[in-house]
Image (cartoon, grey):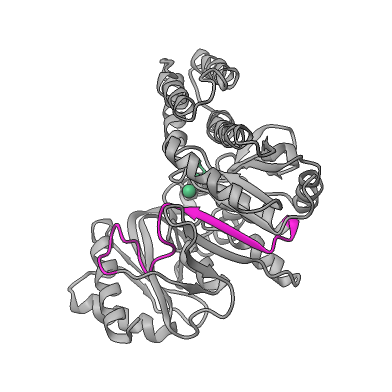
């Protein structure tokens, strides 16, 4: 039986990419002591592969070969029985047959198809641990009582999940290896928490059991001052407050799910401080970023953004459009990243795929769809940093279509034509950190 556990560790898909990766993950789990709960993502690329399978099935073609070959290859590499996952793969195929037959893919069905990624990886990791003589149990998070609303593709946990998770986990023998990303709604239908949702699962589990520590193992050093794939000269952020990390994730830093830290903020309000770490699976002994504590005070934390935001303009006074806008955003789980108001009405922007298009459709003629934009957000440093960023952008000749300088809580945010986002991020990052130092 797992007593209330002091340590929750989450492994992302990149850490579990191949047999070698799974082996390293299991080394870390073995070295983590007895009171540990593991949360896993699907093996790298599998969620995208499953999405493709589901869409192809709806279009009339059935092809699960790649998913099967990938998992069988992994099992072989790990010295496990290559037929070990066949029952699940067969179930997946049956579901795809059904989708092909109907010729349409409903959002709930897509979630069901995607669920195989984590269901399979949890079983692989648990089997490797068992093979090493360590007691481990693969568990589907929904069997632990992780229940959500029915907003497929980005479902939200219902109140009360913490108690269910806590009670169910206490009854799991050995190390629980929990599927990230997955849940079920009140009617028992499979739901998912949104891409990168395993981070959120891990945070929910950590908050539920009152973990002392939550460690996210990634394939990157930690949280950086900007996305190193886009910006040169970034540096590692060794210490961040919970709010700073949440703000970075909220504005686009995809190293963590945008809402992953919410359960931890909630825990803190209840007096339970969970220390959070982001570590690189390549150097598991080194703590990359420690999240908690006071953070960087009034200094600039980092620069992030979204490469594509969708926007809507809704006129005030037009048949209750504004009230409907906010009610619909709530119903569709759309949290706008940027919002501007004028006598004419309100403009809102949210990342592509977040559901703002659905809100626009429901508002019909009350809403006008705006051209997509890229955003750059300056996290930390208040309005002063925002003003400096604005100066840097003007100096570089970048066309800002909207600017909010931020304050001591909100980040400064700038919008551009989509093609200018990456350059804008680099300009702001270079300029701000050259000036204030690191
Ligand atoms: N497997 C899901 C994804 O690729 C969830 C996750 O990795 O956290 O988004
Ligand atoms: Mg991830």
Front residue (pair 73, 296):
73
In magenta stretch: residue 124? no
Magenta residues, as a range? 208-233
- Front residue of 100/91: it is 91
Give the residue drawn at x 81%, y 42%.
Answer: 171
Question: On screen, 334 above or below 296?
Answer: above
Q: Position of residue 295 (x, y in %)?
A: 52, 79
Residue 156 in view of the camera: no
Q: Nearer the viewer, residue 74 or 392?
A: 74
Measured as percent of width and height from the top left, residue 58 is found at: 46, 21
Q: Position of residue 169 (x, y in %)?
A: 76, 45
Could you say where residue 283 lies in the image, as x and y percent from the top left? 43, 57
Mark yes or no: residue 229 visible.
Answer: yes
- Examine the structure image and report whether residue 222 is included in the region drawn in magenta: yes
Q: Residue at the spot x=48%, y=30% of the render?
A: 78
Residue at the image position 23 percent from the left and 69 percent from the top: 399
Q: Is residue 128 above or below residue 342?
A: above
Q: Quadrant of the N terminus?
A: top right
Seen at 64% across and 42% down, the residue is 178
* Residue 73 position by quadrant: top left
Say which of 188 and 143 sits in front. Answer: 143
In this rendering, the count of numbered labels is 0
Q: Main secondary structure of the magenta part?
A: loop
| Residue 272 location, quadrant | bottom right
Image quadrant in which the C terminus is located = bottom left
> Residue 174 vs residue 228: left or right?
right
């Amino acid at each position: 039986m797992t007593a209330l556990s002091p340590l929750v560790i989450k492994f992302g898909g990149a850490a579990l990419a191949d047999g070698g990766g799974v082996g390293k993950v299991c080394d870390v789990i073995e070295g983590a002591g007895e009171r540990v709960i593991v949360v896993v993502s699907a093996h790298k690329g599998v969620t995208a592969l499953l999405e493709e399978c589901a869409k192809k099935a709806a279009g009339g073609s059935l092809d699960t070969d790649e998913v099967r070959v990938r998992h069988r290859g992994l099992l072989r590499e790990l010295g496990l029985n290559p037929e070990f996952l066949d029952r699940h793969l067969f179930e997946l195929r049956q579901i795809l047959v059904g989708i092909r037959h109907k010729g349409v893919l409903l959002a709930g069905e897509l979630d069901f198809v995607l669920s195989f990624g984590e269901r399979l990886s949890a079983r692989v990791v648990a089997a490797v641990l068992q093979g090493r003589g360590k007691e481990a149990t693969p568990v589907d998070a929904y069997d632990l009582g992780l229940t959500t609303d029915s907003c497929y593709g980005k479902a939200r946990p219902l109140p009360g999940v913490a108690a269910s998770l806590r009670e169910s986990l206490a009854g799991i023998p050995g190390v629980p290896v929990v599927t990230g990303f997955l849940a079920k709604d009140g009617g028992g239908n499979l739901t998912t928490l949104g891409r990168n949702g395993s981070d959120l699962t891990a945070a929910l589990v950590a908050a539920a059991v009152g973990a002392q520590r939550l460690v996210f193992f990634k394939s990157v050093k930690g949280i950086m001052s900007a996305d190193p794939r886009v910006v040169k000269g970034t540096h590692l952020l060794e210490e961040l407050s919970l709010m700073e990390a949440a703000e970075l994730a909220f504005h686009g830093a995809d190293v963590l799910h945008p809402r992953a830290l919410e359960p931890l903020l909630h825990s803190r309000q209840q007096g339970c401080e969970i220390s959070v770490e982001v570590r690189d699976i390549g150097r598991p002994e080194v703590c990359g970023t420690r999240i908690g504590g006071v953070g960087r005070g009034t200094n600039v934390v980092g620069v992030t953004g979204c490469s594509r935001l969708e926007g809507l303009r809704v006129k005030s006074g037009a048949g209750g459009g504004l009230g409907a806008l906010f009610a619909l955003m709530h119903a569709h789980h759309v949290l706008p990243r940027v919002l501007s108001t004028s006598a004419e009405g309100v403009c809102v922007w949210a990342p592509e795929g977040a559901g703002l298009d659905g809100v626009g459709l429901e508002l019909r003629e009350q809403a006008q769809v705006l051209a997509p934009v890229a955003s750059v957000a300056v996290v930390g440093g208040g309005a002063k940093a925002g003003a400096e960023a604005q100066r840097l952008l003007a100096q570089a000749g970048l066309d800002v279509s909207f600017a909010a300088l931020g304050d001591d809580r909100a980040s400064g945010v700038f919008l551009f034509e989509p093609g200018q986002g990456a350059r804008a991020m680099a300009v702001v990052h270079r300029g701000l950190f050259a000036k204030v130092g690191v």
